[in-house]
């Protein structure tokens, strides 16, 4: 078997690699190699010492993604061992649900690969040419180890373009129904695997949605409701839940989910959340529980200033709208805003709303989304549960 190509890091790149971060940027290579991309390469430091094996990208600013630090054969047995570890971990931590993240990129030893399981229907997002080359083998291993009902590629995310990979959505194995019904705690949800956000559902919020039910009371407001994930869990214990969402198709699916669960106390409102909160405050509306689960306001560092303003505005309005003893569940999925920064935004929002609040829970992504300590980009989701005193 031929020896993999070798790439050498600069002294600066070596110092960065010693922090444990699994990515190496193009500026930290001594010279860009004449490789098409997707190759497994041996990585050497600036003095020629072996550091590990990584997948190479010819297009992205991230030139290398480490796969293994010892020198070992990357063959079927290598992938099967990692896959079995990933499956065993989900068997331990996922309970009361049949939809979860099965493979989460670097945190499971599959850099650039996401696999979600929706009641036996597997959905792939392949984000790197290195994993693209090994995809047939990994699909075959999943068929052998899990016997899935179907396998669908949701390769329609923009990051693939940055890697020079084509965009596509296709079912490559089995039969995928138009909607997949999944169970999440005491709630059932209909998932559009091919057309929904991400791979069909925001699985990283699963445990937070289930946890929200413990605080459900009176009249609740679910902002950025999407297909009603939080709202459905709340509605089983609340008198009424208002769902605010700007997407008409998402609200339609939320109403279908309400019907599926036999719930008739959800009110859909198609409206911009910022406008709704402002109008509700002016009208003197009050709620006993409010959920804020917006999309990422800070997708890059350039967005930070506007993101801070946006998060501050919706949290200030939410505090104004809460009854004494009311609960705020507020989230941020912006990696470019740290947890301490987000907590400070929420603190200032409470102060400006003249509300005293206590922090009950600090939560993150569901346990099927483990964060790699050396990859802070995977520590993105923040969820605070607060009570107005």
Image (spheres, rainbow, N blue to C red):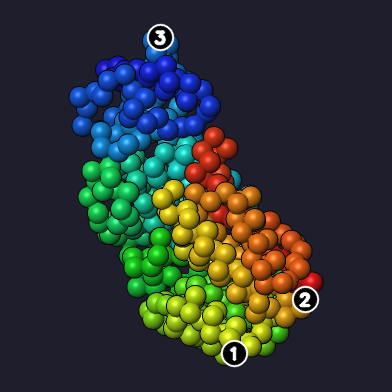
Query: Please, is residue 316 above or below residue 47 in the view?
Result: below
Instruction: Residue 316: name its quadrant.
Output: bottom right
Q: Which mark is residue 47?
A: 3
Instruction: Describe the element under mark 3 as helix, strand or loop.
Output: loop
Label 3: few (<14), some (14–19) or many (≥20) C-alpha neighbours in 10 Å:
few
Q: Which residue is mark 2?
A: 325
- Residue 132 at x, y = what percent? 30, 42
Q: Earlier in the sequence, mark 3 or mark 2?
A: 3
Quarter of the N terminus within the rendering: top left
Give the total of numbered labels. Answer: 3
- Residue 143 at x, y = what percent? 39, 50
Quarter of the C terminus within the rendering: bottom right
Residue 320 visible in the current orientation: yes
What's the CA distance linking mark 3 and mark 2?
62 Å
Report the front residue among 203 and 267: 267
Query: Please, is residue 366 above or below residue 321 in the view?
Result: above
Instruction: Residue 214: name its quadrant.
Output: bottom right
What's the CA distance linking mark 1 and mark 3?
69 Å
Instruction: Describe the element under mark 2 as helix, strand or loop.
Output: strand
Q: Which mark is residue 283?
A: 1
Residue at 40% across / 65% down in the picture?
Answer: 197
Residue at 39% across / 81% down in the picture?
Answer: 248
Report the front residue among 350 and 300: 350
């Amino acid at each position: 078997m031929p020896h993999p190509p070798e790439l050498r890091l600069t002294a600066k790149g070596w110092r960065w690699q010693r922090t444990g971060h699994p990515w190496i940027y193009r500026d930290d290579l001594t010279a860009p190699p004449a490789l098409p991309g997707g190759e497994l390469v041996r990585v050497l430091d600036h003095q020629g010492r072996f550091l590990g094996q990584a997948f190479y990208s010819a297009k992205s600013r991230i030139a290398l993604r480490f796969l293994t630090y010892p020198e070992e054969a990357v063959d079927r047995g290598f992938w099967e061992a990692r896959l079995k570890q990933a499956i065993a971990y989900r068997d331990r931590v996922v309970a009361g649900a049949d939809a979860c993240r099965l493979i989460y990129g670097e945190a499971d030893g599959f850099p650039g690969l996401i696999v979600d399981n929706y009641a036996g229907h597997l959905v792939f997002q392949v984000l790197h040419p290195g994993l693209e080359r090994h995809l047939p083998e990994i699909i075959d291993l999943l068929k052998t180890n899990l016997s899935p009902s179907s396998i669908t590629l949701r390769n329609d995310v923009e990051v693939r373009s940055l890697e020079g990979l084509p965009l596509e959505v296709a079912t490559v194995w089995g039969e995928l129904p138009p909607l997949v019904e999944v169970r999440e705690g005491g709630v059932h949800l209909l998932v559009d695997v091919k057309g929904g956000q991400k791979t069909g559902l925001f699985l990283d919020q699963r445990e937070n949605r289930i946890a929200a039910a413990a605080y459900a009371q009176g009249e609740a407001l679910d902002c950025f409701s999407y297909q009603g994930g939080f709202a459905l869990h709340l509605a089983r214990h609340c008198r009424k839940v208002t769902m605010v969402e700007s997407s008409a198709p998402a609200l339609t699916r939320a109403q279908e989910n309400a019907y599926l669960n036999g719930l008739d106390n959800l009110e859909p409102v198609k409206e911009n959340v910022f406008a709704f909160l402002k109008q509700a405050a002016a009208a003197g509306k009050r709620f006993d529980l409010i959920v804020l689960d917006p999309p990422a306001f800070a997708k890059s560092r350039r967005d930070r200033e506007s993101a801070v303003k946006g998060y501050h505005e919706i949290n200030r309005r939410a505090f104004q709208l809460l009854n004494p003893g009311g609960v705020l569940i507020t989230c941020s999925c912006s990696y470019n805003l740290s947890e301490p920064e987000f907590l400070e935004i929420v603190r200032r929002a409470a102060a400006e709303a003249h509300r005293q609040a206590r922090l009950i829970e600090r939560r993150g992504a569901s346990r099927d989304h483990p964060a790699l300590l050396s990859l802070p980009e995977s520590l993105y989701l923040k969820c605070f549960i607060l009570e107005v005193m």
